[in-house]
Image (spheres, rainbow, N blue to C red):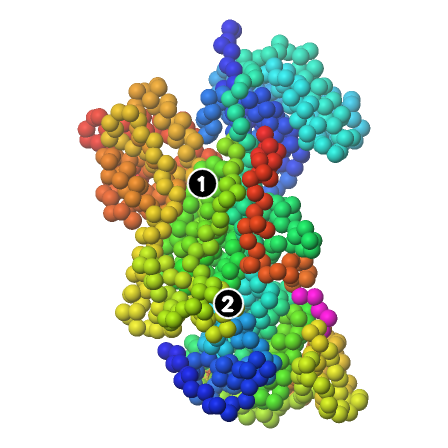
Amino acid sequence: MKRDIITNKFVIKFANVNGTGSASANKLFSRAVFRMGIPISPKNIFPSNIQGLPTWYEVRINENGFLGRRGGIDIMVGMNPQSMERDINEVEKGGYFIYDSTKQLPPALRRNDIDFIGIPLTEKCRELYDDPRHRQLFRNIMYVGVLAALFDMELDVFKQLISDQFKGKQKLIAPNVNAVTTGYEMAKKMHACPIAYRIERRDNVGNKILIDGNEACGLGAVYGGATMAGWYPITPSTSVIDNFARYCRKFRMDPETGRKNYAIVQAEDELAAIGMVIGASWNGSRAFTATSGPGLSLMNEFLGLAYFAEIPSVLIDVQRSGPSTGMPTRTQQSDVLAAAYASHGDTKHICLYPSTPKECFEYTAKAFDLAERFQTPVILLSDLDLGMNDNMSDPFEWDDTRKYDRGKVYTEEDLENMTERFGRYLDVDGDGVPYRTYPGTHPTKGAFFTRGTSKDEYAIYTENGEKYIENMERLQKKWKTASEHVPKPIIRKTNKPCTVGVIHYGTSEASTLEALHHLNSLHGISLDSMGIQAFPFSDEVGQFIEEHEYVFVVEQNRDAQMRTLLINEYDFDPERLVPLLHFDGSPITARFIRHEIRDWILQTTTSPRRRSRFY
Amino acid sequence: MSYKIPAFRHPNLPKNELGYTTKDYEGAVSTLCAGCGHDSISNAIIEACFEMSIPPHRVAKLSGIGCSSKTPTYFLGNSHGFNSVHGRMPSVATGANMANRDLLYIGVSGDGDTASIGMGQFVHAVRRNVNMVYICENNGVYGLTKGQDSATTDIGSKSKKGEPNALEPIDLCAIALQLGSTFVANSFSGDKEQLIPIIQAAIAHKGFAFINVISPCVTFNNVPGSTKAYDYIRQHMASTNTVDYVPHAEEITAEYNEGTDERVTMHDGSMINLHKMNSKHDVHSRTSALTMMQECKAQDKVLTGILFMDEGSQEIHETMNTNSTPLRDLDEEKLCPGADELAKINELHR
Ligand SMILES: Cc1ncc(C[n+]2csc(CCOP(=O)(O)OP(=O)(O)O)c2C)c(N)n1
Ligand code: SF4
């Protein structure tokens, strides 16, 4: 069969057994593609931490830079007998299944519409290594070598990567290079290499970096000046704090004293974690926590206190599939409402929705400015897909002249010169944001009592209904002011007038933009889009919806939570906001979005108009 | 409502080293029931801080929710205060302490607040040896929610509303001792002579200082049959020691009887004199404290005094090796690694 050669545009998936050390081999492969200048987006699909269960690693390679999940698998590297049947079935027509041919493939699993490439990896390892652990490890590295041959990749790139990775551990370099080369040569000998898929050097990566969102958040907290973190471990947020700790060890050891310019406390639970953050922020530190859905639930009572008592606090919520423990190692965007309105009573919290590691870095640093400027909780909503997978990103930037916005804080001098009475909750500037003082500032002025109960402008406890209303309305005014300071939506308009728009936020961005590109090029449908970056919504968000008759809201949850938030905050006719929902725990794909929109648009030309797929 | 105390100061009120009078250590007028033990504790805190010449604004007072947790409004009006949520004062105090290690942290809690909803946080604040004074105003009943039994109510004890309590109580001092609290004391709100120096010793202590104060609730639990009632406590108190606190600036002139007294020098050079009622008790031994508590309990007695102290203890900042400059005072220059370092980090990800 004569086949078209497909270069730098395919999806490859690795099927492994959890706990066998395949992660670094898979990473070695994707990094090599990236180093050859080709955009990639790898995604880990892993079980909830149990040895021996199947785990997958899916890499999309796309020289045009489309990096959301595409949908479909072209090449499967099937190293897990347990999941082999479904792995084979997942390969698209015309694709390849690469396997360890030490053991014969059960004939029943054969398909005629895909190619099977067998390499006796285990056999070779038995021959080369005595130690069973080495056999397992190097078998992984060997299949990377096989891929290098099959895709006709530059072997030198792998060698360089290996020596970069084991810098300082010289002894490990040669055996790893050997394993790659062995795999490479075996494949060359046994098969007609290269196959119909190629990887060719390009210059399409520019100065981009490859990093996961949790590392970006941890680094953002260091750059944003966080000095205190209180936290409790939970997947997929744990590595935010791990990275914060790692960078703190590097950058925050006082050179004169050798002591830490930071404090990290592993709390006994999430209640305590957020309590510590609130205590530290009340006392003038920039403090934060990282958690996921179940932790956010536990933090509710305290978040209400921080909102009402007006205490800055930063929370990074790396969302996973709920409700309850749900699918703890799968992704979703289903904490949108829980975060926006966390706690009882009329509460609402500033939320930020990053889509890329760069936004994770920037928004984390900015979260501290916003929290202190508005003296309120700020919740950054990342998710497992963004947080735990390597994502291609613009490099991070920092302006050295940047000053932290510590918000409205009276200093000792301010208090000394003050003739009027200090009022903790007085709206001095008419923007709803009062002034605070740090404990211990002045001997006689500026002390106040922080409480979750109702109070007047001078922080004196009161149950007077009018005072309560005044305070609640001031909080609302503060909310309005905040809407002008949070990141604005990113609006992308087509050059034609367009009555249908698309809203996305967070990790739905890449797939949505790709779907829109293909809707245009394949179906001649062009739509405007808007990426929402923050809650409260700035005026531009409402305007965008106003300007379009129908707007799709793309999100990764069952209940169309962002749509609900928009309807709730704006009072739009719900019919105008069309939910486009994906919530099986895997990242949303471009294909899915394209098909949903295409079908809807085709349907709407015939009457009666199809009702939105929403329950 | 909290009422402000009139600013009038009697010209002849005694002044402390800082030139402050006790007025400077008072707070708003209490709205607790007249006769509530908690008010006596507030007064003891005021006296203790006045005598120690603590700058009021260098104190942060924190609490949870409950009648007891309301009390920080009623002392040290020039200090920042924080009524957090029910049972969670320890975490807020821990965070606050992380931000600024230079203030004095006084946490006030109730037995409901500490021994039920806040038990986890209490336990972990002890375990971390957070440098703070933790006072549990223990009335064996829920005051603010009107009279339910608490987890510290003794077996057989009967509150105004209730049946005799059938459950084993939690002994907070025993728990604190077993968890490794570096200072543990038990006292009674009606015994000012004992309570004030105990609070002073706790303030001088570096690390977690736990004081359980039996503090009768006149409204719901000051009845015959209650083991946290004034009469009961007065009749059943047994002291292990009485205490004098001597600031380091003061010359020690008093004569002490060797063998029955013990002087303990605190980290700041101040001194605590323990006049031992029971010379068998070694205040530096947890086992001795626990044994003595058991013995007293068997005799239906309530042991008071400083039960245990480890004056050389390492508080959390030392364990964590944090800078001596309060973290909250660090600025961009110390905190932000800058653009050049970021460029290097970018490079590592290519
Ligand atoms: C989460 C939560 N649950 C319940 C309450 C109601 N509540 C307020 S104070 C209190 C008990 C207070 O008892 P204690 O700590 O012993 O203090 P006391 O009033 O006796 O001094 C309770 C249950 C609350 N405020 N918050
Ligand atoms: S109800 Fe009890 S604890 Fe509360 S103020 Fe009155 S006497 Fe004190």
* Label whose residue precedes the other's in the sequence (2 or 1): 1
Front residue of B238/B167: it is B238
- Residue A208 in sight from this viewpoint: yes
Q: Where is residue A35? Give x, y as percent.
A: 59, 24
How dense is the environment of label 2, judged by Cα within 10 Å: few (below 14), some, or many (20 and up)?
some
* Dominant secondary structure, magenta: loop
- Please give the name of the residue rendered at 47% of the width and 65% of the height, measured from the top-left corner: A413
Front residue (pair A32, A590): A32
Q: Residue B9 placed where, x, y %? A: 45, 87
Which residue corresponds to mark 1? A354
Q: Position of residue A406 (x, y in %)?
A: 47, 55
Using residue A401 as the reference point, say whether residue B209 is left or right of it.
Answer: right
Q: Amino acid at mark 1?
A: Pro
Residue occupying the point 66% across, 51% down? A253
Q: What range of the chain is rendered magenta?
A: B311-315
* In this rendering, position of residue A229 left or right of residue A309: right
Q: Secondary structure at mark 2?
A: loop
| Front of the two marks 2 and 1 | 2
Three-letter amino acid code at disc 2? Thr
- Residue A441 bears which disc, if any? 2
Is the CB–ligand 1 distance for label 2 below 8 Å? Answer: no
Q: Quadrant of the C terminus of chain A?
A: top left
Residue A529 x %, y % = 33, 32
The answer for how far apart the CA atoms under marks 2 and 1 are is 36 Å
